[in-house]
Image (spheres, helix red, strand yellow):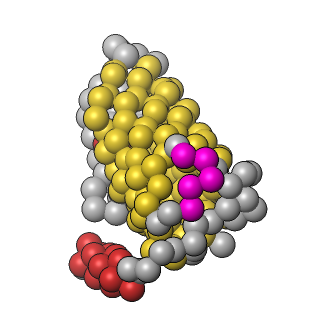
Amino acid sequence: MRKTMTALALSSALAAGAAQADVPGQGTFNLSLTDLFSGPAVAQGPMGTTGLSGPTYNAGYFVTDDIMPYGSLTVSSGTNTALLLRGGSRFYAIPGDTGSLRTFIDGELLVFSNGMDAIGLGGNFGMEYHVSQHFSVSGRVGISLVNPDEGDTVFNLGTASTAVNFYF
């Protein structure tokens, strides 16, 4: 049911935003939901097990028109309770671009815990379509390097996620 409602909301928002949209800038807060339809690929467990499912909650703040530091939280309780914390910064690739479709890169620090703690680094490339100054949809692909307390370091290539973004 959640998937159907989200798909309907996104499709109606995209249809309503056919005109050129203003984009958020310095001093704007961001709240977003990532991975609405599946668990975050970048949040795979240290040994390659998935372990997390459900949305990731993100909050950010534009310190300039093109730079937004953010933090993320994913909590999941499947067979084991799992927690993923991320902190990073998003850099819009073309400074001063105010078009509806913007590209970005971001880098982040990952802290994963589900009985076997891990720490890692991630980097992503993505695109964001601004339906209005207060709403957008985005997708990103990237890489991550995760080093668990026990076992081998895991290198994830081609991790992907989608998000709905709200700006205030």
Q: Give the range drawn in magenta.
A: 94-98
Which quadrant would the N terminus be assigned to in this image?
bottom left
**Which residue is nearer to you in this view: 77 or 102?**
102
The residue at 47%/55% (across/down) is: 102
The residue at 46%/33% (across/down) is: 123
Residue 70, relative to residue 19: is it above or below? above
**Which residue is nearer to you in this view: 131 or 165?**
131
Residue 94, relative to residue 24: is it above or below? above
Residue 161 image position (x, y, % from top left): 34, 50
Q: Does the magenta stretch include residue 91?
A: no
Q: Main secondary structure of the magenta part?
A: loop
Residue 163 in view (yes/no): yes
The residue at 31%/45% (across/down) is: 160
Residue 75 image position (x, y, % from top left): 46, 52
Residue 137 image position (x, y, % from top left): 41, 65
Residue 111, relative to residue 40: is it above or below? above
